Image (tube, coloured by chain):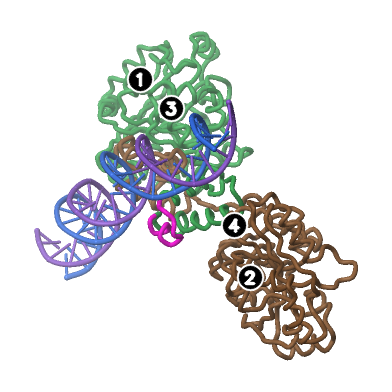
Chain colours: A brown, B green, C purple, D blue
Amino acid sequence: MHTGPAQVVLTASIARRYYLEGRSKVDIADEFGLSRFKVARLLEAALESGLVHIEIRSEGGIDVDLSTRLQDRFGLQHSVVVEAPDDDDDESLRGHLGRAAAHLLAEILTPDDVLGIAWARAVSAMVRALPPLPGTPVVQLSGVLSFPGGPDTSVDVVRDVAGRSGGIAHVFYAPLTVPDAATARALRQQPEVARAFSQLPFVTKAVGGVGLWDAGLSTLYDTSSDHDRRTLRELGVCADISGVFLSAAGEPVPTELADRMISISAEEMRAIPEVVVVPYGIRKARAVRAALRSGLVGGIVTHAALAQAVLEMK
Amino acid sequence: MHTGPAQVVLTASIARRYYLEGRSKVDIADEFGLSRFKVARLLEAALESGLVHIEIRSEGGIDVDLSTRLQDRFGLQHSVVVEAPDDDDDESLRGHLGRAAAHLLAEILTPDDVLGIAWARAVSAMVRALPPLPGTPVVQLSGVLSFPGGPDTSVDVVRDVAGRSGGIAHVFYAPLTVPDAATARALRQQPEVARAFSQLPFVTKAVGGVGLWDAGLSTLYDTSSDHDRRTLRELGVCADISGVFLSAAGEPVPTELADRMISISAEEMRAIPEVVVVPYGIRKARAVRAALRSGLVGGIVTHAALAQAVLEMK
DNA sequence: GTAGCCACTGCTCAGATGAGCACAAAATCC
DNA sequence: GGATTTTGTGCTCATCTGAGCAGTGGCTAC
């Protein structure tokens, strides 16, 4: 805008008619006795010079900027970044994310979907906020983690979701980890377990958590033996998506521990069209990055600080 | 936006591509696998819901919103409202307005214009900030106000402007007011005065001030006799544009004082295509309103507080 | 003076866009 | 269960819009 105040005011006047009153350039040109090209050039200059400022604001507690950046950066189908206070405690954070995840699920689930649920604390929180779903069958993806004094188990969560949806609940009572591979194999043969796992190929959407293979950042790590903790670390395990182990680069890592688990495998997870993860806590950034790079994940619900941290890692 | 977080994020994503990256709706529709109609509707919803916020920002110290409102409201050709601090003193205010008026004049004057100058303190301030003008002849519109210890007289101002433009200066040495109508008539016959006044029909743009017919708000009032002050007030004089008296409604008021003045008449002023006034001081709002309603004024340079006050008078 | 350069204007034409419409799916009512 | 309304979708057609182009006038360098 290098001409003078009259030009600035004229441009502002035109910009108001165009952008705020929604009138056409031809119409405006007629009003001011200009050619539509002149109007177009003034509007261009207005945009260029910052006289007209267009901003995409966050809305409904969702940081749309971080959401879209995360989505674009990792090629996700859905991404919801919640604007939670940075100093929020985990409990409150889970509440926020749970509600957001519940809304997302309610939005993207169709009557034709089959929903898989892998246990995680944020998933438990989600269930509590879940609105009625359209008759979706629900499949349990992982065994019950023995977690003394903990909240709902996988089975409870799956039942609750099915209750909300009015669909069938494919549940099984089995522990997540057992002492040896043979026991695991035997358990998987059990009719109840086999029936649930036979549904896996039909699962179209799933929800799970992300753990960082370190103390306090993965329920699986915290409930594992020292030996397993060490072994997996030595194998380069960085993250787990509800029992599927990943390297920092996002490659699935085969482990002996996986053979001893009654849980969805990496291949089975990859076959699910959209797996939504609900991670929280800024320290999990590395794990989230691994999960997103793995290609296993199609959706994420998280909070601003973690999203920011993940994006800044690159 | 009544569907859910995925919709919000999708819409934000589309809005970013459309508004910030300047891509076409067709292009965006292809990228997301949507119809262009869907994209258009999402963008419409984004605008509607406030997710996309478009703002016309002030720039270069000009309050474009007030400027355009003033322009639209009173059908002005030009309007420049300067963002001056509300508590600015008159001297500093005149400086701001003078600079803005100088820029405006430099912008709108063409080599074919003939500029008329009526003395006012803000006009003096303008001259000090005036950039070179394109050879414009300059015509003095009013006699010299005897203003003891005051700054430049009308003559000085006209000479200065002509110096800046390189054009001819049509000046005359005569007082603004004389004791009786006969003297005024005689003075107007003088060759120098007559020559200057003969240029009036050719004046295409003029600059002047606005006074409110009250103490301290009009140099003309302040230099008038008690009798004149009272008489004009009784005649309903509210404002003067460099010696042309107006009622509150903006009607020219014929006065005996006018007959005793060596100055442009209301009819002569009406014949000038664009008269720009440079008023300041929030207390002059009534006078400015009268001036703008008179139809004599085509342009205004003022400050935000006064513009606001004038607009609020309705 | 005049040749060349630059900024600015409005034009053409193809592609983008909006208003209104028709149709289908979903929700609601009886 | 079926009729009716509501909602959402994509279409056609007329209009709007942008990219690129050619003409114009002002300016400078010789």
Residue B11 relative to residue A42: left or right = right
Query: What residue is disc 2 on?
Result: A200
Residue occupying the point 51% across, 23% down: B287
Closer mark to the observer between disc 4 and disc 1: 4
Query: What residue is disc 4 on?
Result: A64
**10 Å neighbourhood of mark 2: few (<14), some, or many (≥20)?**
many
Q: Kindly indicate whether the residues beneath marks 1 and 2 are on one polypeptide chain.
A: no
Cα–Cα span, label 4 and label 1:
62 Å
Earlier residue among tags 3 and 1: 3
Name which residue type carries label 3: Phe
Query: What residue is disc 3 on?
Result: B74
Q: Kindly indicate whether the residues beneath marks 4 and 1 are on one polypeptide chain.
A: no
**10 Å neighbourhood of mark 3: few (<14), some, or many (≥20)?**
some
Residues at discs 1 and 2 in contact (Cβ within 8 Å)? no
**Residue B228 visible here:** yes
Q: Residue furthest right?
A: A149
Cα–Cα span, label 2 and label 3:
72 Å
Residue occupying the point 78% across, 64% down: A155
Nearest the camera: B159 or A36?
A: A36
**10 Å neighbourhood of mark 4: few (<14), some, or many (≥20)?**
many
Closer mark to the observer between disc 2 and disc 3: 2
Residues at discs 4 and 3 in contact (Cβ within 8 Å)? no
Name which residue type carries label 4: Val
**Any mark on residue B311, and which?**
none
**10 Å neighbourhood of mark 1: few (<14), some, or many (≥20)?**
some
Q: Please provide percent x and percent y for residue B125.
A: 48, 40
Query: What residue is disc 1 on?
Result: B265
Name which residue type carries label 2: Leu
Name which residue type carries label 1: Ser
For the record, the magenta segment spans B26-36
